[in-house]
Amino acid sequence: MLKENNETAAANTSLFGKENYIIMIAGLAIIILGFLLMSGGKSADPKVFDPKEVYSTTRITIAPILIIAGFIVEIIGIMRKTK
């Protein structure tokens, strides 16, 4: 009987809590936003190279910072102890 209670208690414990999942989903959303910003928009004329569109601050600086921040949020969500 005691063995059955220990097995059901072990089966009911989860690796992550609700707060961990919320943090991980927020990190995933930040990563997706970073990749969307990095992809940018469509060029008006595909035959003409516009360096302002390709080398914009959003694509070169902001998007990679968001992606790295998203991975940091993911690590925090995984490493945070459940209460």
Image (spheres, rainbow, N blue to C red):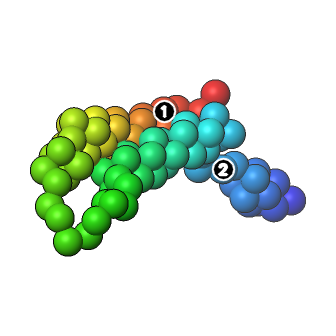
Task: State which quarter of the image contains the C terminus.
Answer: top right
Residue drawn at (39%, 41%) of the image: 70
Residue occupied by mark 1: 80
- Residue type highlighted by circle 1: Arg
Residue drawn at (79%, 58%) of the image: 8
Residue 15 x %, y % = 59, 50
Residue 50 x %, y % = 17, 54
Residue occupied by mark 2: 14
- Residue type highlighted by circle 2: Ser
Left or right side of 64 for 3: right
| Location of residue 2 by image quarter | bottom right
Residue drawn at (51%, 46%) of the image: 29
Name of the residue lying farthest toward the bottom = 47
Question: Which numbered dot is residue 35?
Answer: none
Residue 48 x %, y % = 17, 64
Task: State which quarter of the image contains the N terminus.
Answer: bottom right
Q: Are there few (<14), some (14-19), or many (20+) residues within 10 Å of tag 1?
A: few
